[in-house]
Image: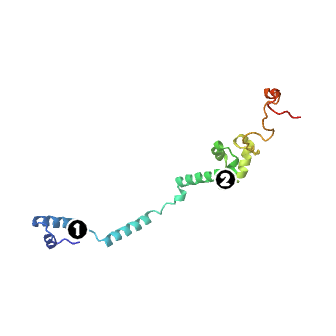
Amino acid sequence: MAFSRKFLLDNGVPEDKVDVILAERNRTLKDYVPQSDVQAQIDAAVEAAKKEAPPPDVKTTAEYLALMGENAKLKAFQGEDFASVKAPYRDIVWEKLDHAEKHKPYTEQLQELQGSMPDLFTTKEEPPKPSFGAQPQGSVPSGKTGPSFMDSWGFIPQKG
């Protein structure tokens, strides 16, 4: 919206304040640059940056490679190969494995380690079956079965 002297006076701005407002407006417009000029400057800066150095390949940075190694480790821990490794020793076993580009499969490497370090691995024994309450053999407790006071006084009918 353009402020003119007439617009300001018509809207009730005092004469002495009109000069101050117009002077401030002219001062801020002095540094105004058209948007087309700014876009041309941005395009020129982008082209200059492209010519200076190619963008870095993030897949070759040390941080990326460390993250990929950690990702591979977590995937291996969740797989079936590491199911036989005891949980506290998984990091130790992982450090002993070969992780080169063309390494033997982890299954083979783990079998070799299991032969040399059996304490780090669980055995393939049948897990015990759960039992709840009393064992199924035996019978219900019957109490004392010898002659009692009730037998001698005849309160319990005699058989036979």
The residue beneath circle 2 is: 79
Q: Residue 150: which quarter of the image? A: top right
Q: Residue at x 52, y 59 (%)?
A: 58
Q: Is residue 21 above or below residue 122?
A: below
Q: Nearer the viewer, residue 148 or 79?
A: 148
**Number of marks:** 2
Q: Label 1 amino acid?
A: Leu
Q: Residue at x 71, y 49 (%)?
A: 109
Q: CA distance from mark 2 to mark 1?
A: 67 Å
User: Which residue ends up furthest to the front in the rendered image?
Assistant: 154
Q: Residue 68: which quarter of the image? A: bottom right
Mark in the foreground, 2 or 1: 2
Q: Nearer the viewer, residue 115 or 18?
A: 18
The residue beneath circle 1 is: 29
Residue 86, numbered circle: none
x then y, percent, for residue 116: 74, 42
x then y, percent, for residue 30: 22, 67
Q: Label 2 amino acid?
A: Gly
Q: Nearer the viewer, residue 21 or 66?
A: 21
x then y, percent, for residue 147: 83, 27
